Amino acid sequence: MHIQKITFNPFQENTYVLHADGEGILIDPGCNDRNEQRQLEQWLEENAVRPVRLLLTHAHIDHVMGCAWVQARYGLLPELHRADLPTLAMVGQSGLLFGISCDPVPAPQVFLEEGQVIPLGAEHLDVLFVPGHAPGHVAFFSPRQRFLIGGDVLFHRSIGRTDLPGGDLDTLQRSIREQFYPLGDDITVYPGHGPETTIGEERRENPFVRG
């Protein structure tokens, strides 16, 4: 399983393509205009990757801007945790607040659950439930390749915002301590914004959630 990160939109959101054997999983498509959509489309074409699933760590506007285009282009509907449906319902209001347009996100028909296993090629991802930044936030963990697609939970020397609707600092810190840190110091974290980091580095140095 290979990982491709592409950073999109004014929020500098990290969209990920996980791919193996010619098939790919799109995670948090943030492409919000035709140029960004074409950039993702071109990468998929050049690398002969066919998207087969569209997963969301959570439904804040910067992580779902490309969902309508992905559905139109590849026929994929977003999959997310049911607890984040209220977040998804607020995308239009968020767009007005930030002065950014976002096409209506197609309604999900499949929902992610804690402990679910998502296959890709010979590998798989485990779904972790990590609320706090958003009530239905999930992360995707590869136990064999030792990486984590963490969304907006844990960043390099920082953590996700908790001042948005549905956010809670104590819950977020508990998610990090109980769900992320026990995975092991060697785990590479691919966050929703900014550079990669490791669990060990953040356990030692993160000022918001010390190990």
Image: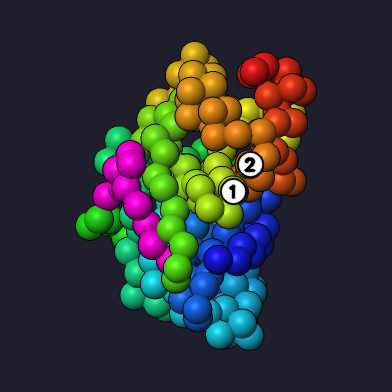
Quadrant of residue 33 in the image?
bottom right
Please report whichever mark, 2 or 1, sits nearer to the chain's N-terminal start: 1
Whether 97 is among the magenta residues is no
Position of residue 176 measured from the top left corner of the image (x, y, whole percent): 54, 26
Q: CA distance from mark 2 to mark 1?
A: 5 Å
Q: Which range is magenta?
A: 111-120
The percent position of residue 103, horizontal first and vertical second, equals 42, 60
Helix or strand or loop: what does disc 1 sit on?
loop
56 or 124, nearer to the observer: 124
Left or right: 76, with 175 as reference point: left
> Which residue shows up at 61% across the image and 82% down it?
47
Q: Position of residue 138 (x, y in %)?
A: 42, 40
Q: Amino acid at mark 2?
A: Ile
Q: Give residue 187's mark.
A: 2
Q: Main secondary structure of the magenta part?
A: strand
Query: In which image quadrant can residue 153 be found?
Result: top right
The answer to whether any part of residue 34 appears in the image is no
**Residue under numbered circle 1:** 146
Q: Position of residue 135 (x, y in %)?
A: 38, 30
Camera sees residue 175: yes
- Which residue is pictured at 25% across the width and 55% down the height? 110
Front residue of this view, candidates 84 and 68: 84
Mark 2 in CB contact with mark 1 (< 8 angstroms): yes
In terms of secondary structure, where does tag 2 sit?
loop
* Residue type, mark 1 in image: Arg
Q: Is residue 186 left or right of residue 56?
A: right
Which residue is drawn at the image coordinates 54% and 34% (left, top)? 183
Q: Residue furthest left?
A: 109
Q: Residue at x 22, y 57 (%)?
A: 109
Quadrant (top left, top right, bottom left, bottom right) of the N terminus: bottom right
